[in-house]
Image (spheres, helix red, strand yellow):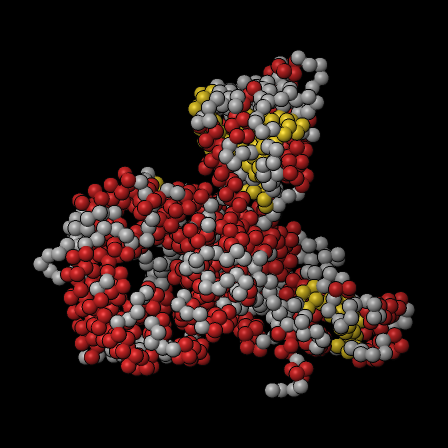
Amino acid sequence: MDLSWLAAVLQPYDIAAHPNFGREDDGLVARPSSQLAAHVYGAPGWIQRLGRKDEIDVDSVARAVEKLFHANTTAEGLRLLQAELESPADSDPARRVAITLLVAYGTAEYDDYGASIAVLSHEIDRTADKTAVGMRLLRAALFQQRAARLMDCGQPPEPDVEAVLSLLTGLDTTDCETFPVSAAVGRTSSQTVSDMRQSLVEAAHSLLHPDAILPGDAGDSDPLWIRRLRGSRPDAFMRSRSRVGYELGQWLRTTFDAQISGRPVNSYRGDLFHSALHLELTGHGDSRSAREEMALQRIIAAQSRLITDDDGEALRLLRHAGADRRLDSGLAWFRAHGPISALAADARRVVARLSSVGQARTVEHAVLAGSADVLTPAESSEALDRIMVDGSIVRAVSLPRHTQAPALLLASACDAALALSVGAARESEVALAVLRTLELQQPDELLDQHLARALSTFRWDAITQAARLQWLHWYGSARSGPWSRLRQVVEDQVSAEPESLRIGADQPTVDEVARMLNRLIHGRTYDAKYLAYAVEPVRQAMAAIADQAKKGIQTFGGPFPADVAAGLILHAGFDDLWMSLAQFLAETIVSRKERTPAFERLARYMTAPLPAEVRAYFAQRSTAILEAPDAGHWGEEHAVPYPAALRFLASSGILSATEAFAGTSRLLERGQRTEAAHTVAELCSRFDWAWLESLTVILSMDPDPATKARAGLGLARLVTKRSAQAGGVLSDRLLSLLADDGLLVPLLTLRGLKDAAEIDPVIRPAVAQLESDHPSRSVRTEARLLLASPLGQ
Amino acid sequence: MARRLSQNQFAAATFSGSNINLHAHPNKADELVLFVHGLGGSGYSTWGRFPEFMFDAEPGFDVAVCNYRSFYRRWRVGRSASLSRVVDYLADALRDFGKEYQAVYAIGHSLGGILLQDAAKRHIEQTQALHVIPLAALVMMGTPSAGSGWAFRGSHGISRDLRVLRRLNPDLAAIEEFWASPRIEERNVFHLQGAQVFLPRFACSAEQDKFVSRFSARVGIPTENRTQLPGTHTSVVKIASREDEAITHVRRVIDEVHEARLQWMREEKSRLSREPRKDRHPIRGLLWGAEEPVWEAAYHDACDKFASGVIAATTEADADLLINLCAAEHALSDGQHQEAAKARTLRAHAPETIPAGSVVGTSAVGPRSPEAAQTIRTWLAAAAPKTLYVEPSRSPSELEHHIQSWLEIVVRRRGRTPSIGHATADELMLDRSDFGGDF
């Protein structure tokens, strides 16, 4: 048995030919295990030593691994390694184990945990000899790898970890067969074997609960985390960690060059792949955080344009890391920036690999929900079949070492099912599955909140009457008691007569007024008397907030009474609320969070001129409103001038064109580009000021998609005011924005075009192309609706 | 070759001299449905009105109907093509249709499904195609992919065509092995890994099929692509009504595959249209004469550390930087080694070797490199009177240092690109002296 094969994957630095030890390490260059080690270690100088292929017979395993580690040939490399395992059984067991570890790693990368665990189990069965030192080490490496993969797919690793510790406890490695090591490490192969043993013990400990107290440690009752804190770490682990530091340093320099020096940088250096690979092959628990770091690095590289296409690799890594929050941010980032193909690639990987129901974790659900827009109907349908069984939703599998509330495991599955239902055209089936699942659950406030939020944006109009009736039936039977938020949503969306919104002994809450107002806004039946009855409570709520603010007490959460008051004025015509609202909005002692939604609503939807006394009131206080810093405790909105107020004051004509320009320019000066773009977008729908055009065009070239999208909205609104001939530059920019990758920019730009009297003939073909060619269903639908609307005819 | 019939309305025709009749709309449809009948069947009679309904569908397909003689139909003629010949011309037809149509959906009944899979295998192997190919999907209806009990041992005495349908026969195994290979993505999920072809396979078994077991009709097909339809082995494809379940199923399969392919194309288009990276021109480097790995490693280390990024030039004609290494011992020797080093160095520095504006750096390497560098300069004195970059490197780190300097020169030369229209903002920023010094 040649244990150098195991060293090639667990301790590659020790046996790869070192570039600085030309003559001393010459003998290693031709050794197959050293060749493999060079690729696993992966530093350029080490691989270069293998570069002279005309003189050296490069081993088939090394060749396969070279392919495995290259993004475009991973699948081929994996196939070659699998073929190596199928070769005659008399090959060296250490070689087989090294290949098995690589295959297990490769298949897990493709989410094929079943295959990964199967290949490990098969090899564990083959290495039945438990007495020889080398064999015990090999078995320990296999058990440890299987433990790590079990943990990856949400199964308990403890039995395998115990097997590892049992195999390695008291293992004397001094009598193992020797093998040549690099002159760079300055020690013997026996020490390398001893280090491998230590590495496996360290990896085993990393998968156990930190509070575990291991049996058999005489007199040591400290929990594992204290022992690990105090103990020394194996050489290979420390080398891997120090390499991470080196690579991150390189990365920092590249990023500095790209962003600060302005030097042309073509590719990023400081790739963490090989340092993470060590953790993967050892089966170390830290491999999850290493995956997360690699993913974050890739996304930042993409943002700095150091790499162009990610192909969903960053999302996969975040998913495999179980980094649920950063995965959400990553999904949002890819939706905004593109490439959309990255979203689709990882979602398809999930669909393709979820071979049976109930394998998905919350991270898989998040990817499916976040990418549902770019899946085909068949793919959406197939994904749904993995989330639903017997007409109800199957909860997610827990993430390893994560404490996840059972309600959230179910909520993530419901989110994914609801998102996929649109593409699969199975809205009714999913609505009923959610209902059936709900009926099987004990009331849970967390699930109630989550489902209420998810179902409030669900396409209720797409479900059948039968499904609607079943929900109504549930609503009727659950009229009182738990699921209060969900009942409200069902009442708002499905019920014709909202029973909880009736004039009674108690005053309506702001929340209830908002619900009735929503019915009016969305064209459902509403009670005008109820709204009239609600005016006074809303006025009182505003007054109470202002009084509290004067005492230094700020409120949290919505709905916001000022926004509801603005809604009552604009949508229901209760003009007598104007003065109360104006007084509230001018109270700079009240946090901006309370006032911003009202300012935004007024800026966007106000069509009639302000009443004279209200206008005079605002005009007198405009400077104070704009210049006062946020009074909120957290100061989330720190921009000055106050952006939402600027939009309202400019839209209502209280500020002149020059004042509005000065205010927007100051926002830009303070780096508030998205707020500036938002402001110009609002003003573009009302005015045709010359400066708007210049500023909108400039902001439409911003690298940040949020800013660009807002500017696109403004640009579209501006173009709709011009004749086709006059809008040359604007039309060109608009065409470019419509062709932007990502969802945000084309979506908002299309929405801006809705305000047009007709679609510019120059723009129309681009909209038609979006309707047929854009990878996102939302963008295609938006384009279709625009073309089908009267202005598109 | 298929016989082309331009038709407004579908009408069956004789197969005069051809094995395939292509029924094309006058304005030619974008997509084609190909029908291949089974053992003992014939071009039109096997399918009833199936081809006609697909031709008339909305949007209409062009329809190709294949005809070949097998089983008892072969008895009636003295000579007829063997099944392997049928596979040949089906593979040719798939190739030809692929040039004309955006998508070809192939439907095979019973033995026809096996022939189709074999032809598709051959087609893919011949074209070395990747990802999306015009052959869009295979739909097998009552196809015994694991053989049929009716084709028992010795039955080939009745007809040699039955051999293909025998259980556990090597031909079927070879076909199945190909479809099971990771090279094919046969599910209707566009999850491609590396060099793969997207070609979903679907199987329909007939509820009352006495010739082909349910197992054999579905084996190897992804679970989600299997369906059971009412009818017998023959009635399942002999369609009389537009509302027939088989029609509905095939239309749904086509719609799903069409949508998957369309989405792939959308994503490809979107990917290709992504704004090209600006201001990111890597330097293309080329290394000559590295006889010891240690010098080659130094070259790669220097490239790796250089912020602008260095990629390998394919030839000297597209190199921005050519590094020519001469082992000091060779440069200072007398004879063959020195001649070779000299010839290579002269060639490296010849004006026609690399493009104008590129940089050539020669380094003598080894302990005696300072003397060797002097010698090299004398070689080049006559040949390259202008800028000469010849430096001695006693150690890899010295070589690394020289290479980095030369890389810097490449970048600075780019910064002085005379036409502002071509130079990028980043490049211009590299050399502010072009703007008259600091400002």
The residue that appears at 68% across and 54% down in the rendered structure is A58
Please give left or right for residue B186 compared with residue A751 in the image.
right
Q: Determine whether A361 is above or below A728 in the image.
A: above
Q: Determine whether B109 is above or below A726 in the image.
A: above
Give the percent coordinates (x, y) of residue A694. Answer: 50, 72
The residue that appears at 41% across and 69% down in the rendered structure is A687
Residue A288 seen in the current view? no
Residue A543 seen in the current view? yes
Please give left or right for residue B365 compared with residue A399 in the image.
right
The residue that appears at 43% across and 61% down in the rendered structure is A752
Q: Nearer the viewer, residue A760 or A329?
A: A760
Quadrant in which the C terminus of chain B appears: bottom right
Q: Nearer the viewer, residue A318 or A727?
A: A727
Q: Nearer the viewer, residue B185 or A532?
A: A532
Give the percent coordinates (x, y) of residue B235. Answer: 49, 20
Quadrant in which the N terminus of chain B appears: top right
Please give left or right for residue A658 compared with residue A47 in the image.
left
Q: Determine whether A460 is above or below B403 in the image.
A: above
Give the percent coordinates (x, y) of residue A273. Answer: 54, 62
The residue that appears at 51% across and 44% down in the rendered structure is B260
Corner quadrant of residue A629: bottom left
Corner quadrant of residue A685: bottom left
